[in-house]
Structure formats: C-alpha cells, structure tokens
Image: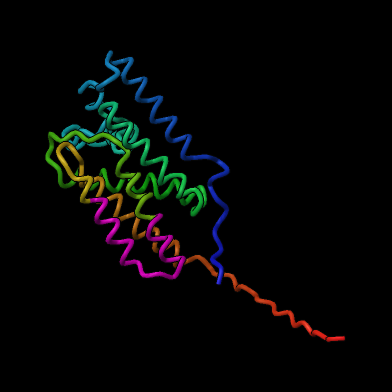
C-alpha cells in the first residue's frame, strides 16, 4: 500500500522564507533598540504578546497574538528557534502542502498564544516562534507514524519527552503545549484523510529448457 502525499511545499521553500523573516525582524529590533544581544523590553512589550495590554485595551493589541511569533528576546533564543524551525520545517515540507504547512504553523502558534493569554498573568510578556514550531514538530511525528501504519504511542511519548526537556525558567510552556497538541491532532487528521493508492505487483514466470 502506498500513501499518496500532496504536492510538497518544498517548491516554495517556505521554511527558508520564515527563517529569513525572523532574522530580518530581529536585526531590525536590534538596530532600533541599540543592542544586538538582547531586544529591549519596550519593543518586546509592543511587538511581543503583552497580556496586560491585550486584556485591558482589547482590539488594538490583538495584533500581538501574531507579531509575537516573529519576535525573539535575544541571540540564544532566536538561534535555538531558527535551528528547530530548520529541522522540523524542512521535514514538514516533505509531508504537507503549502496551505497545510502554513495552517499548521500559524494556527498552532496562535493557539499557543491564546492559551497563554487565557492562563498566564496579566503582566506576562511572551515572544518567540516556539509554539508554531512545536505545532510543526507534533504534526510531523504523528503524521509519519500514522501514514506508515505504525502505533502512534511512540510518537506521543517522544512528543511528551521533547516537551518536558524544553521546560525551564523564562520558557512559555503554555505556547509549547498549545502548539504541540494542535500539531498532534491536525497531523493525525491529515494522515487519516490521505487516500492510499494500491500497489500493484507483477509476477513474471520464466520457463527454462535444457539442451
């Protein structure tokens, strides 16, 4: 049995485009803030997700749920996220169409940010693409196991393990959790909807004669 995979998003190299945008925005913020190592708090409060502003003023600051996915706090933060996006993004390009890839990335990131808005305190400021990246990661590992007709338990254990080792101080585990759960769910749904193509086998019989 062969699983029919949709036209890959690899043609568009969307992973490289996202990485380029993240890097360009970081450079812009570093120039404006006057520090290449760490982005200043005023910029992170305006372009990141500042729960207090969204909860108090509402609509004018809803944009932060989106822009925060492109803002990173420092060089180590952006370096780690770019590396993970490169790994899981390129893998996702092999599995999903362009629209599926973008949907997983941005919807997963938004779900993580909304979960942060609902649960985290008002003075909480969140930045980074890790929620969206976790969505790609979850979708990839569950899709791979499901389309290969293997047990998904191993994928769930691996996802849980990666989630645990990424917990720590100043880490938005709510964004990670929201993105990961969405990725696992949508990856499973997409794999279940893929229509397998029958693999035809041909047998050729040879007749031998001795002289």
Relative vertical location of residue 58 with respect to residue 105 in this rendering, above or below: above
Q: Could you say which is closer to the camera, residue 137 or residue 65?
A: 137
Quarter-of-image position of residue 2 = bottom right
Relative vertical location of residue 178 with respect to residue 58 in this rendering, above or below: below
Task: Check if residue 155 falls in the magenta segment.
Answer: yes
Instruction: Write the residue at 44% across / 70% down.
Output: 149
Quick one: quadrant of the N terminus?
bottom right
Asked whether residue 40 is in view, the answer is: yes
Instruction: Write the residue at 24% across / 54% down.
Output: 161
Instruction: Write the residue at 44% across / 46% down.
Output: 102
> How does the figure colour the protein chain or chains?
rainbow
Residue range of the region highlighted in magenta in the rendering: 140-163
Asked whether residue 57 is in view, the answer is: no
Direction right: furthest residue:
211
Instruction: Name the main secondary structure of what is drawn in magenta.
Output: helix
Quick one: quadrant of the C terminus?
bottom right
Task: Check if residue 45 falls in the magenta segment.
Answer: no
Direction front: furthest residue:
211
103 displayed left or right of 71: right
Instruction: Write the residue at 26% across / 31% down.
Output: 48
Residue 140 pos. (x, y %): 41, 55
Q: Could you say which is closer to the camera, residue 98 or residue 88?
A: 88
């Amino acid at each position: 049995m062969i699983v029919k995979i949709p036209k890959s998003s690899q043609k568009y190299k969307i992973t490289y485009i996202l990485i380029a945008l993240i890097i360009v925005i970081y450079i812009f913020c570093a120039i404006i803030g006057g520090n290449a190592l760490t982005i200043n708090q005023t910029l992170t409060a305006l372009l990141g997700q500042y729960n207090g502003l969204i909860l108090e003023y509402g609509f004018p600051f809803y944009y932060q749920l989106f822009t925060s996915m492109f803002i990173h706090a420092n060089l180590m933060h952006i370096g780690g996220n770019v590396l993970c996006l490169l790994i899981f993004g390129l893998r996702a390009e092999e599995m999903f169409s362009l629209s599926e890839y973008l949907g997983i990335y941005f919807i997963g990131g938004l779900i993580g940010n909304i979960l942060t808005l609902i649960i985290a305190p008002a003075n909480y400021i969140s930045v980074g693409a890790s929620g969206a990246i976790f969505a790609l990661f979850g979708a990839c590992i569950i899709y791979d196991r499901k389309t290969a007709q293997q047990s998904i338990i191993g994928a769930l254990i691996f996802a849980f393990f990666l989630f645990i080792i990424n917990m720590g101080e100043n880490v938005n585990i709510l964004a990670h959790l929201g993105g990961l759960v969405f990725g696992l769910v949508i990856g499973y749904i997409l794999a279940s909807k893929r229509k397998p193509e029958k693999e035809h086998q041909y047998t050729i019989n040879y007749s031998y004669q001795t002289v």
